[in-house]
Image: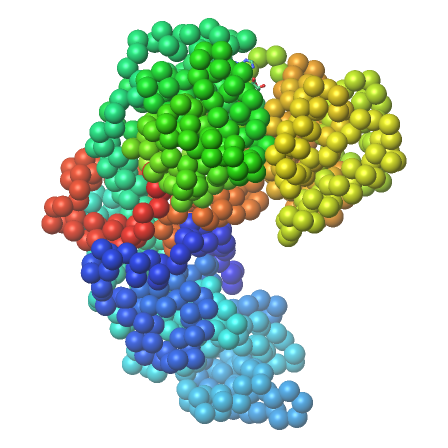
Amino acid sequence: MPTVAKERVANRRTLVRMATSRRTLAVAAGQARSTSRSPLDAPAQYVKGVGPARAEQLARLGLHTVEDLLYHVPHRYEDRSHLASIASLVPGQRQATQGVVLALSEKRRGTYQFVAALSDETGVLQAIWYGQRYLRRVIRRGSRLIVYGKVERAGRLQMMVEEFETLTGDDDDTLHTGRIVPMHPATEGLSPRVLRTIIAQTLSQHLDGVSDLLPDAVRSRLDVPPIREALRAIHFPTSLAEAEAAHRRLAFDELLILQLGVLGRRQTLQTVDKEVRYAGDGALLQRFVGSLPYELTRAQHRVLAEITADLRRRAPMNRLLQGDVGSGKTVVAAAALWLCVGGGFQGALMAPTEILAGQHYLTFRRLLTPLGVRVGLVIGGAARRERERMRDLLRAGEVEVAIGTHALLEEGVAFARLGLVVVDEQHKFGVTQRAALRHKGFHPDVLVMTATPIPRTLSLTLYGDLDVSVLDEMPPGRGMVRTYVRGPGKRPEVYAWVREQANGGRQAYVVCPLIEESDKLQVEAAVRLADRLSQEALRGVPLSVLHGRMRPEEKEQVMESFRSGAVKVLVATPVIEVGIDVPQATIMVIEDADRFGLAQLHQLRGRIGRGAQTSHCVLLSSLATDAARTRMETMAQTQDGFVIAQRDLQLRGPGEILGTRQHGLPDLRVADLITDVAVLELARDEAHRLLLEDPDLSQREHAALAREVRRRFAQETTLAVG
Ligand code: ADP
Ligand code: MG
């Protein structure tokens, strides 16, 4: 009998787990507390058969309440529904059969064995259990049993029993055999069998207390089963089709709540009346565009038109700008800030590292100072007096554009009239950080930028409350990037080549191995590598080291000498992953490349290939694991950020890629953002329809939905809105 494969992607459950558990949420959210009382909030111990010890084991699986148990859905099913007759059992296979116990015996020497001779009208089977002495008290002569396990022939026909069940005759409802059996995610000391029993008990005690969130009209239009029916069927389906339908229903509920929450927030934002930040006739933008040393791409023009329209609206802009590394997001941000300043407001741009902030500062000064805009740099490492001065200027409105790191978020940093907030590499920041910057203004316009291309399902979910602009075109004149994967044995050869290239005037990055555990070790690794290279393989080549622990002026000095071409080789920690832009650097060597994730490699490699010349990227990797091999192959095959992101998603699952803090959305217990795309789209359409009909979900038939949205979104946590 086949074991039914219905394995779902394992990451489903961890995907959108919040930094705070739902438990703390319910307590934290005062408003939600009064509305969230329900019989399903009862502790798991209210279920018959769950004592303190079991409750503790359940807690380890994150199962605290009756509701948690009801929504602890199987990760797969085993089809044990077909009961073979004893004569038709096939040795070597795992099968289920049933029969009446004719005789019992025990073997006490060696490992304890309990044997029941079962018979049906076709034959006799020796059912064997190991080490389970209690069976004596459970299985009697004359009992009718269903057994499931591996069939063997050792003279007699026998079975190593994995699951069994005693049939009582009057009610032949089985749990563990003779049906499609759910396999719930289990843990040590809490086997699938025990969980199954507990969940069956939970259903029989509490299913009646579950009320349907969906109005009947919606439910029948979408043709999904009622909630109680779905909960029963997801745990104990009579067919796989039934389980599938149940999954669809439960996933739909979950995604609908998510979409209602996200779209609801978006809707709320639309009612805000900010001041209009830019009312000019286009001449201002023309002036900026005319001052650039290059033509904007069509994509840049399009995105700027979208942003301009947002600035002219009364509701605050809340926009995500997505564009692959090197697509030219910075100049778009500069244009937006220019318009904001032109409208009489201040702007701020926050970047994740001092190096990147420093670079942006130079870029913005170059772009905006000639137009009369006063640009300031706000970083933690600055001298105290300078910091105070900058704060005064910002407060007085004399510095119009502040470029900085999270130092911008410090309490002492205040703006006279902050109108636009730009967050670069937004995935590097948490929800609260983005929100903190936003709160420095009065409903400022918000533009968040990322190079991480997000598959449609995820963007619908995570960025549902944002408008999305995409830069899908690279500026012209970019050279190719060739990528090579080389084993450690080839290191000398690789560096001999780097040396030759550097002597010929080309510039290279060498990225040292990633050490996630410690910042300090990471810095040491870079310094050591730089020392070794400058003494050996790259002796005589002008070389500098760059890492996160250097003082800002040191970093700036190093970057400047690399930019000017005085330094040919820059040995760096992975801090250069984000944003660094030195177009004439055309070579990159990444040490121990397999320690990096795909997204990180893509970002790193994005530092080269920015000029007209062909660039070269060497990935040094021992290819020790299959996963490493796959990643390196992907990098060698494609330069397309979207393809790489898709691949990353397949390899790691969405949870890891997006991190957990970033989006702060409720936990998904059933839905799988990779496989449930169709359900997600359905849920989104339905959420739109509902909000159109009843914008604040105040109609009576929507009360349950509204309550659930409030409960699940108790904590104000959103990407940019915060
Ligand atoms: P990213 O989107 O990765 O942040 P950047 O904004 O750093 O990319 O841009 C990468 C490089 O492309 C920069 O050197 C920038 O000056 C240049 N660039 C941007 N737009 C254009 C354009 N339209 N034409 C030519 N070069 C451009
Ligand atoms: Mg950038």
Q: How many marks?
A: 0
Position of residue 32 in the picture relative to residue 721 (left or right): left
Expressed as whole percent of the image width and height from the top left, the position of residue 44 reads: 34, 72
Is the C terminus in the top left, top right, bottom left or bottom right quadrant?
A: top left
Question: Residue 79 or 398: which is nearer the viewer?
Answer: 398
Q: Is residue 314 visible?
A: yes
354 relative to 501, above or below: below
Expressed as whole percent of the image width and height from the top left, the position of residue 119 reads: 48, 82
Query: What is the residue that sits farthest to the left in this orientation?
Result: 700
Question: Residue 515 or 235: which is nearer the viewer?
Answer: 515
Residue appearing at x 32%, y 28% in the figure = 417
Residue appearing at x 48%, y 39% in the figure = 406
Expressed as whole percent of the image width and height from the top left, the position of residue 483 reads: 71, 28
Expressed as whole percent of the image width and height from the top left, the position of residue 680 reads: 35, 41
Kindly indicate the quadrant of the structure image that contains residue 536. top right
Position of residue 703 in the picture relative to residue 107 (left or right): left
Q: Is residue 637 visible?
A: no
359 relative to 408, above or below: above
Query: What is the residue that sits farthest to the front in this orientation?
Result: 385
Question: Residue 215 or 502: which is nearer the viewer?
Answer: 502
Residue appearing at x 56%, y 22% in the figure = 362
Kindly indicate the quadrant of the structure image that contains residue 693. top left
Q: How is the image coloured?
A: rainbow
Residue appearing at x 37%, y 25% in the figure = 397
Question: Residue 495 or 81: which is nearer the viewer?
Answer: 495
Kindly indicate the quadrant of the structure image that contains residue 138. bottom left
